[in-house]
């Protein structure tokens, strides 16, 4: 049975960009499950599966739907225990929750603000209006003003990645010798901005790039199926 993945897109339905949806695309591939993306622009999210879920990703498998990226990953782990593990046990689930909170608080704020106009410019007009209204309310300023400090803030952002960098100096993946959901959480964030923006978030010689390349090559090059923004 093919799983349906409701996946956030802009004006080009072939360029899904949500970090949370990418986590689940990687997770489904990790479990060896066939899936079909359902391109879903911002203004269509409220109508997904009759409005039962407020955000994407949402997956449908037969008559079942599950929302929230972490809950989807847990659901996949529990329903397919005979397939490659996403967590490696309860301790791995707990560690992944920590990594997810770190990504939300340490990665996403800078990435989102630095790439915000790139995201806006890749949306259809109706979605641009929605995006502008919601983000200006969130940040308390005009959309165009939000990324103005990204260059001066970038050194601090790069420095904040040292725990990730030093961990990857010891092992190939956050999951060890192979990837786990922890890798997909962080790779999803970098894939998000890779797809929407040509801004250099990482230095050209940053070893994190090597890990990201390994993640993009996983599952038959799933991440590379969507080219980087140019």
Image: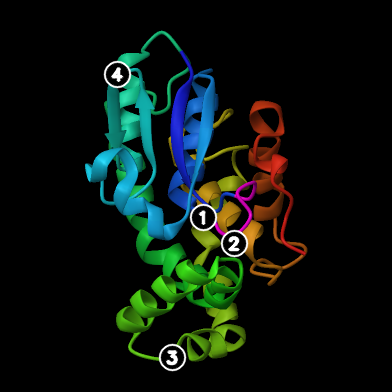
How far separated are the C-alphas under marks 4 and 3?
44 Å
| Residue 129 to residue 179: above or below | below
Q: Secondary structure at mark 1?
A: helix
* Residues under numbered marks 1 and 2 in contact, where contact means CB atoms less than 8 Å apart: yes
Question: What is the span of residues highlighted in magenta in the rendered image?
Answer: 10-15
The answer to if 13 sits in the magenta stretch is yes
Image position of 97 (left or right of 189): left
| Residue 166 to residue 76: above or below | below
> Given this view, does label 4 or label 3 mark the residue nearer the observer?
3
The reply to whether residue 175 is in sight is no
* Residues under numbered marks 2 and 4 in contact, where contact means CB atoms less than 8 Å apart: no
Q: Which residue is mark 4?
A: 78
Q: Secondary structure at mark 3?
A: loop
Q: Which numbered disc covers residue 193?
A: 2
Q: Which residue is mark 1?
A: 189
> Given this view, does label 2 or label 3 mark the residue nearer the observer?
3
How far separated are the C-alphas under marks 2 and 3?
21 Å
Q: Secondary structure at mark 4?
A: helix
Instruction: Identify the residue shown where x is 26% and y is 51%.
Output: 54
* Residues under numbered marks 2 and 3 in contact, where contact means CB atoms less than 8 Å apart: no
Badge 1, how many Cα within 10 Å: few under 14, some, many 20+? many
How far separated are the C-alphas under marks 1 and 2?
7 Å
Specify the quadrant that holds the C terminus: bottom right
Q: Which residue is mark 3?
A: 142
């Amino acid at each position: 049975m093919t799983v349906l993945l409701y996946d956030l897109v802009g004006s080009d339905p072939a360029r899904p960009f949500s970090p949370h949806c990418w986590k689940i695309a990687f997770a489904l591939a990790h479990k060896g499950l066939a899936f079909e993306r359902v391109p879903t622009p911002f203004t269509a999210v409220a109508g997904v599966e009759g409005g039962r879920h407020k955000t994407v990703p949402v997956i449908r498998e037969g008559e079942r739907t599950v929302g929230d990226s972490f809950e989807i990953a847990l659901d996949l782990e529990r329903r397919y225990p005979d397939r490659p593990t996403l967590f490696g046990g309860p301790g791995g689930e707990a560690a992944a929750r920590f990594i997810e909170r770190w990504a939300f608080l340490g990665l996403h704020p800078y990435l989102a603000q630095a790439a915000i106009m790139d995201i806006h410019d890749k949306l259809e007009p109706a979605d641009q209006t929605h995006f502008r209204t919601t983000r200006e309310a969130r940040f308390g300023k005009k959309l165009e003003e939000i990324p103005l400090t990204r260059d001066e803030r970038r050194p601090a952002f790069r420095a904040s990645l040292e725990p990730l960098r030093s961990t990857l100096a010891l092992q190939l993946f956050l999951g060890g010798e192979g990837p786990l959901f922890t890798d997909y959480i962080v790779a999803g964030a970098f894939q998000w901005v890779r797809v929407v923006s040509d801004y250099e978030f990482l230095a050209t010689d940053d070893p994190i790039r090597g890990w990201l390349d390994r993640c993009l090559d996983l599952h038959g090059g799933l991440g590379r199926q969507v080219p980087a923004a140019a």
